[in-house]
Image: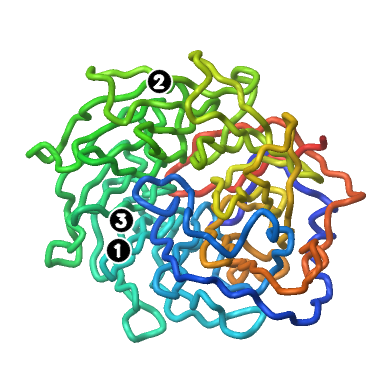
Amino acid sequence: MRRARTMPLGITLAAALATAAVLAAPAPALPVAQPVANVNWPQFRFDDRHTGFNPNEATITRKNAPRLSLEWQAQLGDIVFSSSPTLVNGVVYIGSTDGTLWAYPASGCGQDLCTTPLWRSTNLAQILDTPTVAGGKVYVGSQTSFDSAAGKLDVFRAKGCGKAICKPLWQGKAGSQSILNSSPTVSNGVVYVGAFDHRLYAFDANGCGSRKCAPLWTGLTGGTIESTPTMDGDWVLVGSDDGKLYAFTAAGCGHKQCAPAWTGEIGFSVFESTPAIANGTIYIGSQHSVAAFPAAGCGQSDCQPLWQGQFQGELNFFGGSPAVAGGRVYIGIESELGVFDANGCGQSICAPEQLDFGSGAQASIGSSPTVAGGVVFAGRNTGEILAWSTKPCGQFQCDQIWKALINEQIVSSSPTVVNGKVYIGSADDSFPEDQSGRIYVYGLRIGGPPDSLRQGQPPSFVGTTVIGSSLPSRTTWSASFFPIASFVSTR
């Protein structure tokens, strides 16, 4: 049974979306800048530390990022919601909300719109998380069917099965509730993933010799898990919606259910925010803050943050997972991107050093930011992808250096920036719902104009009126149904 796309808060872009749905005429073809190296992006937030920082990007820089333009699109099924592209050995993978895992050539098909994937999965009911590629396999979380919310870890050969549609090699049984935003993490032969039933699951990455596999062990938390597990030595770290960071022993405890080695008190629901680790510190977002903890713990079972970043107390909502690069922490705050000193401020509560602002219509940034080539990228629920320089602008509020519009309001996917390209998932609302899902791919065209909005992009929202609320809110939903809510305001 197909789930209708819903926006429970009733907030829309009204006439602005109808205008933006019309594509501008394509510009003449220009030579495409080629990357100097081939780098893989195998999982959500780039690597096991989940910093959202690609230190190897040498093609896109803060100087040439304004020249990015749309190169091609991959057609999927339903909209991409939260799932972000992973790219390994020339193949880009992503999940769509109709429960399909897709694999396309990362270089496209030579056309503006690619409609034939290398392969795709059988229907897995619902996929909101990001695929992980490790050891020649692709791991992705889902629910069992539209009639059963029971969680499943689905495992495929990365190269496919020799057919257009592939069944999972095996599935891990992950309790009675869906795997939603929690993406699999693979380390030392074990796959870790969180589920909506409050548990962290650990599976043998090679399966069990059967089509359905039980976990090696589980770790119980006090709330639903939408956070992606992050590895740090002997720990596997994950956030929970009970407002805590949990650290479990990665090897388990010798029993089927394990207690955490220690927990960190955040105080607000973590939702989909994933821990990032840099220079011995764990950073994790929540409903109203970003918190920092020592990666080694505090020597006690319950730890307090080293510091917490907030903006105007609890008035503002944070979204997505933090990116950490160059001594700074980037995370969505309402419709802007907050930038904090990674070392804190010498006090328990720290304000952002600056806010990165995107012009035009305003809506929430729930897309986890990505840093590469001296540029930070994020999606915004005005149907836009934005980019800012990581170099301070000398003011508290800094403007974007580039943005591009797409034909769908929801942009909750995190940008994947690798090998001179920007990949991001969303949709094109001018197509039927079951053909609207998209991977958008941007690159540098040599000699092109500095503003990508003049390169075959949809028209901007300039001169339009956007109706809605300025403050996003988060509601609880059934694990068998995904909500798609955006939060739009005028500035």
Q: Is residue 45 above or below residue 29?
A: above
| Residue 211 visible to an observer of this rendering | yes
Closer to the chain start, of discs 1 and 3, is 1
Query: Does 472 sit left or right of 42 as displayed?
Result: right
Q: Which circle, 1 or 3, is nearer the viewer? A: 1
Closer to the chain start, of discs 1 and 2, is 1
Q: Which residue is mark 2?
A: 305
Q: Is residue 262 above or below residue 207?
A: above
Closer to the chain start, of discs 3 and 2, is 3
Q: Tell me the number on the disc at residue 134.
A: 1
The residue lying toward the viewer, choosing from 44 and 207, is: 44
- Residue 43 pos. (x, y %): 40, 57
- Residue 131 pos. (x, y %): 40, 60
Q: Which residue is mark 3?
A: 152
Query: Does 239 sit left or right of 319 as displayed?
Result: left
Count of labels shown? 3
Count neighbours of disc 1 (C-alpha within 10 A) and say few if under 14, some if 14 to 19, many if 20 or more: some
Residue at position x 60%, y 38% in the image: 332
Residue at position x 58%, y 50% in the image: 412
The residue lying toward the viewer, choosing from 64 and 104, is: 64
Q: CA distance from mark 1 to mark 3?
A: 18 Å
The residue lying toward the viewer, choosing from 307 and 368, is: 307
Residue at position x 69%, y 80% in the image: 31
Residue at position x 53%, y 16% in the image: 349
Q: CA distance from mark 3 to mark 2?
A: 33 Å
Q: Tell me the number on the disc at residue 206.
A: none
Q: Amino acid at mark 3?
A: Lys
Q: Quadrant of residue 234?
A: top left
| Coloring basis for residues | rainbow
